[in-house]
Amino acid sequence: MQYDYLIVGAGFFGAVFAHEATARGKKCLVIDRRDHIGGNCYTETLAGIHVHKYGAHIFHTSDRAVWDYVNRFTEFNNYVNSPIANYKGEIYNLPFNMNTFSRLWGISAPKEAAEIIQSQRGAITEPKNLEEQAISLVGKDIYEKLVKGYTEKQWGRSCDSLPSFIIRRLPVRFTYDNNYFTDRYQGIPEGGYTPIFEKLLEGIEVRLGCDYLENREALRSLADRVIYTGPIDAYFGYALGRLQFRSLRFETELLDTDNFQGNAVVNYTDRETPWTRIIEHKHFEFGQQPRTVITREYPADWNPGDEPYYTVNDQENNDLYSRYAELAAKEEGVFFGGRLGEYKYYDMDKVIASSLKLCGELL
Ligand code: FAD
């Protein structure tokens, strides 16, 4: 065999595994069907601005070991995610906090906000759908202005026809704190994400534009073991059926202005505006460039061949995944990981932790 490991996918799961295996003297070949490394975290430079090509990525974690690990490959800035909601031109802070409530109701004391929310929750004890669930959590005003339209666009369905389990929690804060995440560590890598992957994969053979499934036999024969981070159902030729996803469409524009919206992330929470968010990439890195790049994000149904962004972890899909996982466990010398290999929404820190765990088991 030419290689100890063939690693399918140059996202965080694959790149971390390749790095660790190489550091332990294993010979690795990394392939990716795309023409770049970095998976969905890939950033490309446009007019001096690092553009998050597959959607805004904010690194946040409470896992000290993962934070220390990733800091070996980049320096993070002090960006704190504080998104804004735009509802028909009205501007609100997110996550729902005292700034939001003060703007909604003209109040200033936490007690007043808590009373208003309580009075709007109604007496729903067993929510029948997402609408009832959301109202029972945050009351009618917040639901109508900040949850309903956004969620309906995201899922392409009305909230009263969506299952309640989609929204388990809607955090409400009675402090004036706009920091979206509650994690101990957060930031954006200076210079974007791509340099992290360049460092992780330094000195490792990488073949881009190379699809494992199109040339499986030849590629499999190159290595003792395979780490596969592509879609698990595709690996098995969809033998048990297709797993479902939600997709996204991005429209990116370079604008001749230095500041379009004054914030990296603005959510459009009404139903009529067709996009859910506009990302202004320079604000992730406090950019001072003369121009700016924005990306409108449109939720989209997923059809075979589309980019699979979000897993749909309902009972039916989870059951199907479990059956694929049983097949995967019998696959000699092949290990499945990452968001597509495990059919799971994974934040970056969790993917890194999971890849390091597999390293611990195999290396
Ligand atoms: P990926 O990054 O998807 O990498 C898998 C790679 O495998 C891809 O490059 C793919 O091309 C390749 N591949 C697949 N099949 C094959 C094949 N047959 N042959 C060869 N190559 C193949 N996480 C956060 O922590 N913070 C955020 O703010 C955040 N924002 C997100 C926003 C969006 C819109 C999305 C979709 C995700 C976001 N995430 C965020 C999650 C983050 O993107 C994932 O945690 C991370 O990308 C998962 O890494 P991975 O290696 O598992 O998968």
Image: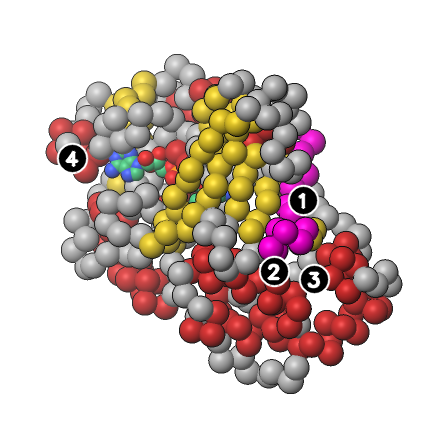
Which quadrant holds the N terminus? top left
**Residue on which the image places disc 2:** 146
**Residue on which the image places disc 1:** 82
Tell me if residue 344 comes above or below residue 294 in the rendering.
Answer: below
User: Which numbered disc, 4 or 1, marks the residue closer to the eye?
Assistant: 1
Q: Residue 214 bears which disc, if any?
A: 4
Tell me if residue 362 comes above or below residue 160 in the rendering.
Answer: above
- Residue depicted at 67% across the width and 54% down the height: 90
Distance, label 1 to label 2, CA atoms, is: 15 Å
Secondary structure of the residue carrying tag 4 is: helix
The stretch of residues the image draws in magenta is 73-91
For residue 135, which quarter of the picture? bottom right
- Residue depicted at 36% across the width and 18% down the height: 204
Q: Residue 4 bears which disc, if any?
A: none
Distance, label 3 to label 1, CA atoms, is: 14 Å
- Amino acid type of disc 3? Val
- Amino acid type of disc 2? Leu
- Residue depicted at 44% across the width and 30% down the height: 42
Distance, label 2 to label 3, CA atoms, is: 12 Å
Residue 110 belongs to magenta span: no
> Residue 61's x, y, as percent?
61, 42
The reply, left or right, for residue 303 in relation to residue 250 is: left
Secondary structure of the residue carrying tag 3 is: loop
Mark 4 crowdedness (10 Å alpha carbons): few <14, some 14-19, many ≥20: few
Q: Residue 172 bears which disc, if any?
A: 3
Tell me if residue 279 comes above or below residue 146 in the rendering.
Answer: above
